[in-house]
Amino acid sequence: MAIKDKLKTDLFPTIWCPGCGIGLIMQQLASVMDDVGLDKDNTVLVTGIGCTGRMGAYMNFESVYTLHGRTLPVAEAIKMVRPELNVIVVSGDGDLASIGGNHLIHSIRRNPNITVLCNNNEIYGLTGGQTGPTTPQGTTTLSSPAGAAYSPINLQGLVNTNPNAFYAKTTVYHQGPMRKAIKEAIEWPGFSFIDIASQCIENNGRRIGFASAYEMLEHYKTEYKPGPRDATRLEPHQLGIVRGEPVTVAGAAPSGSGTVE
Amino acid sequence: MTKRLVQGNEAVLLGAIRAGASYFAGYPISPSSEILAQASQYAVGHPEFRFLQAEDEIASVNAIMGGSLAGAKSFTATSGPGFSLMQEAIGYGHKIGIPAVVVNVMRVGPATGMPTMPGQGDLNQSRYGSTGDYTSFVFYPSTVAECYEYTIHAFNAAEESRSPVVILSDAFLGHLNEVVDLDEIKVPVVERTIPPLASGGTRLFSGVATYPDGEPATADSDEYIRQYEEMREMRRKVAQRYAFHEFGWNKESDTLVIAFGITRRVAQPLAPHFALFRPIRIWPTLDEELGAIAPRYKKIIVIEGSDGQYANVVERMLLRRVERVPLLGGRMSLEAIREGLDKIGMLPKGSSTAAEAPAKGVKAPAKGVKAPAKGVKAPAKPRPKAPARADAKASAVG
């Protein structure tokens, strides 16, 4: 197994800021691909707008870099047309949960057999650090100088509106659990969503009091604890996987009746 | 094989199937919904044809981009407000070079507007709806048979131009039923032009300006211009094979009428009095084709279901003034055309409503309704009196 085979290392260094968490996600994704049998002939990456979206350009797979917020309809269509393909969505919390929020709730409902990796840095990083849908209430950002006014969106709750879906919470510090979650998610028969807490030091961390990316990783290390095995619900800052009731997903479902038999 | 009654919207769907389409994603909206419903019906018996009723038009149009990249000839159908929502992704398709077909069955806008009334007001949007510079292919048939025929051409043009091609229709044409034998219409089908996803490569399909290796080219003007000009030139060449138009009626007349889509049908009784130029390919414009015949005519009248969208285009193409007969608010009738012609002093002598039969396929006025005399505007229909609202009363008292 060679991670390097999965990456376009000739394009390195990446565009991401020093200390960014996205590379840690790409590393784990690349490292599990051989284990679960993903290669150029059977895998498509679909990425959205935001820093995370660049990942498609750095991996040795065919990749669709969609419009802002539109990863899920593109990914679902690819899966419906080519059920034999592994379709992996990699995007940020703003792309998936804010501008793409309507697609997210309906993808969860339709339960397509795709995997979503959400780089959740609680901020709009690419545009400089504005409040996002996952920004904790009270956080000072470029667009919330008096503190973010509203409570963040409940991604776990959204995903689990479908009793057949898969939700995992991890952080970029917890590489083992992240690796396990990515592997399980890819093999999950249906919609799987991995919510990965990830640091954005340049456009969020420093503004909220962290001196370095290392400090943010230390924060994940001390704040996040493993949740119970076979959890049905994770508390905030708990690591773990909430598995729904797996159903057989028919990629070529009778059209007009959704994608699940 | 057999002649039968076919509806305009149905003919579009059948044309798509004939062209080899195997993925449809859409969202219900009048007056296009029959295409969605019939696509879902077709999918039941044809598992190779994939169907998605999406959560909205944004999802629909992005889904057909994904479906096309995955290998299926893909299409969607919508109307005014839904077409507006699709514009960003249409630009995305142009940027990347994704073959797809978007059907826009026009109603009266803007906004929710008049959902069941025919309009032709989306011409500009079908050309300029997205941001930046790109070359749109847009076809607008006039008959049910043409809905079938030009849908196949649209899929062909989409493959050859590697772009989302738009088929314009309208509420009348989409709901028009005509007896046709679609099997008699033979259009060769162009096969897929891009290898499907996961063909062993490492391509990056990016809406962001990038170099061929995938690195961002977001601040490289020269690279942008190189890619843009290459795409524009390729599409210009493809367009030469799709210069569809009609030139007919009374070519000896000194006046040329320009009408398209349903308007050309409604104007049919004027055939003895005027020459007709009908663009079927609305975009790119038919500069050469129109330019070759326009000098023969002293006057040019553009009859259309918008306030001059195409008339402006003709003036720009020919660099000369044209007369305008706008049919607004869904009032697409021979009477409305006569009124418009009379207003600009162009109503043909000796033509009267009674003397001419209505155009084929155009609804005759209901029995007992007398057509207004020429030049006389029909009195406005009295609006039914609304019962006084209780809350209005209350506030008046309060």
Image (cartoon, coloured by chain):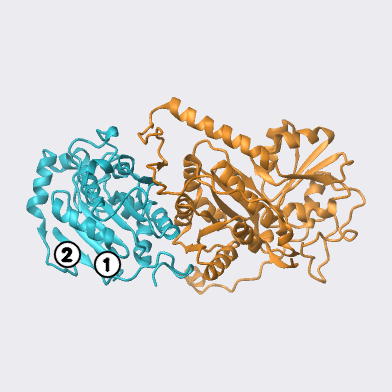
Chain colours: A cyan, B orange
Q: Is residue A151 visible?
A: no
Alpha-carbon distance for marks 2 and 1? 11 Å
Q: Position of residue A96 (x, y in %)?
A: 32, 53
Residue at the extreme top: B222
Q: Quadrant of residue A168?
A: bottom left
Residue at the extreme front: A1
Sequence-earlier tag: 2 or 1: 1
Mark linked to residue B361 = none
Residue at the extreme right: B350
Packing grade of label 1 (10 A; few <14, some 14-19, many >=20) is: some
Above or below — where is A205 with respect to A180?
above
Mark linked to residue A234 = 2
On-image quarter of the C terminus of chain A = bottom left
Q: Quadrant of residue B207?
A: top left
- Please report the residue visible at 38 percent of the width from the left and 29 percent of the height from the top: B219
Q: Position of residue A224 (x, y in %)?
A: 11, 55
Count the labels in the image: 2
Above or below — where is A39 with respect to B319?
below
Q: Is residue B59 left or right of residue B343?
A: left
Above or below — where is B397 with respect to B56?
below
Circle 2: element type? loop
Q: Is residue A111 left or right of residue B110?
A: left
Packing grade of label 2 (10 A; few <14, some 14-19, many >=20) is: many
- Please report the residue visible at 40 percent of the width from the left and 27 percent of the height from the top: B220
Residue matched to label 1 = A160
Residue type at the position of mark 2: Leu
